[in-house]
Image (cartoon, rainbow, N blue to C red):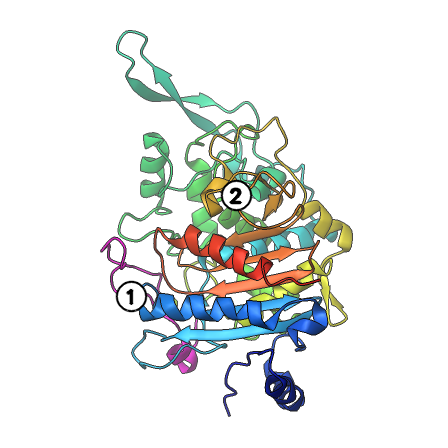
Amino acid sequence: MHVKPFRFSPSKLAYVSAAWMLSAVAQAQPLPMATPESVGMSSQRLEKITSTFQQEVAQGKLPGAVVMVARKGKLVYSQAFGKLNNASGGDMKPDSIFRIYSMTKPMASTALMMLVEDGQVQLTDPVSKYLPSFKSPMVSVPVVDPATQATTFKLVAANKEPTVQDLLRHTSGIAYGELTKNPLVREAYIKAGVYRTDIDYDARDLPGAQMAEALGKAPLAQQPGTAWEYSLSVDVQGRVVEAVTGKRLGEFMDERIFKPLKMKDTGFSVPAQQASRLAEAFPKDPATGAVNKLIDVSKPPGNDSGGAGAVSTAGDYLRFCQAMLNGGQLDGVRILSRSTVTLMTSDHLGSAINTSINPGMLLLGAQGYTFGLGFLVRQGDGMAGVHGSAGEFMWAGAAGTFFWAEPKEQTCTVYMSQSPSPQRAYYRRLLKSEVSQALSD
């Protein structure tokens, strides 16, 4: 039997209903439930989320969405809005499945850090130790003609090889074909089959070993360790995991992350029997009229893309978020040490790394953020033009998903939608504001 999404209201009736429902639906929830007031949040103020997203759906700006908020390890808000927008024509539900695109990255980075903890990988290792095609890379650098000011590109030897740490913090020199302005890199990615011009962020056709071989031979867009550039680095992380373990990335992550955390609907494809639960985007973006093309997750891919290939539910991802907020453990199961989580959610860019492409601006349209090992990390309470506090960590997905964990406030929030729109950053900032304003202690 499907249990309808549970919402809290400040009325006495709602509190009675909450008490009655706690035991009835606890097993269906990703975390134990509590009234918002019992953990220092306002029921009335949380309802602003409800009215906001109901309005966005009613105005045709979103097909549907799921929002879950947890504080102090308790689920205090869980609501589904709109429609799945798939062939079933059904309503969006809390357990609907979403393509999470780049929200795969923090989990894949967690998988690689597990191998660091296991003593099988070190952050200072060159990537070529595991993937030989990355040995002696070349870099495509711009050359400006002083007479005409025209820019061309030429290949030069890299000053050093990219390291495992470079992969984790996006300073490897690898790029995305969709984002880079370096023509030699883009052309090499097309030739290698890791960049498709017909659909964004889909490098899943090639078998993993072939993908690594081809990408390793392509030129780098930056000298390794010098600049932050969002990239296919996390897909390469997946290939490192496979080279070390002899297992597909998805198999390793299932064994070490998904099953231990009871993330039962997370993986790299959707079984046919669950296809009716998969949310879809509008055929065209309401804001721009652009055709929406999302990756096909109906069958296992050629490679498990650690950068953009996973599917999940809001509840599953909330469990991952809470485990990381808890310092690497949930419900007595530890997937990482507290010290490793601290390392991952610390600043790994500092002042030596060029951040002209700024990670905070990319994700939120806001300064005040740096990058750790797999996560965007807030540097201070101020500076950023968005609610939050120092030490919070987060990431998002191209199709409209977003999460963050805020250690200072002990909150985890997950937002799921299939809306690959330029409005993505707006919704991220909006939801951060509406969760933060509901804090009452």
**Which is more toward the observer, 150 or 116?**
150
x then y, percent, for residue 108: 57, 55
Label 2 or label 1, whichever comes before in sequence order: 1
Which residues are drawn in magenta? 270-296
Q: Amino acid at mark 1?
A: Phe
Crowd around label 2: few <14 · some 14–19 · many ≥20 (10 Å): few
SS of the residue under disc 1: loop
Is 227 left, or right, of 41 in this rendering?
left
From the image, which quarter does the C terminus lie in? bottom right
- Identify whether 113 is placed above or below 216: below
State the residue position of label 1.
282
Residue 266 seen in this snapshot: no
Q: Amino acid at mark 2?
A: Gly
The reply to whether the magenta stretch includes residue 241 is no
- Which residue is at the far top? 147
Crowd around label 1: few <14 · some 14–19 · many ≥20 (10 Å): many
- Identify whether 275 is placed above or below 328: below
Residue at 67%, 51% (x, y): give it. 113
x then y, percent, for residue 240: 57, 49
Residue at 43%, 48% (x, y): give it. 211
- Label disc, if present, on residue 130 of the rendered structure: none
- In this rendering, which labeled residue sits more in front, label 2 or label 1? 2
Residue at 36%, 57% (x, y): give it. 420
Give the prevailing secondary structure in the magenta stretch. loop
Residue 437 seen in this snapshot: yes
State the residue position of label 2.
385
**Which is more toward the observer, 318 or 237?**
318
x then y, percent, for residue 136: 52, 29
x then y, percent, for residue 213: 45, 43
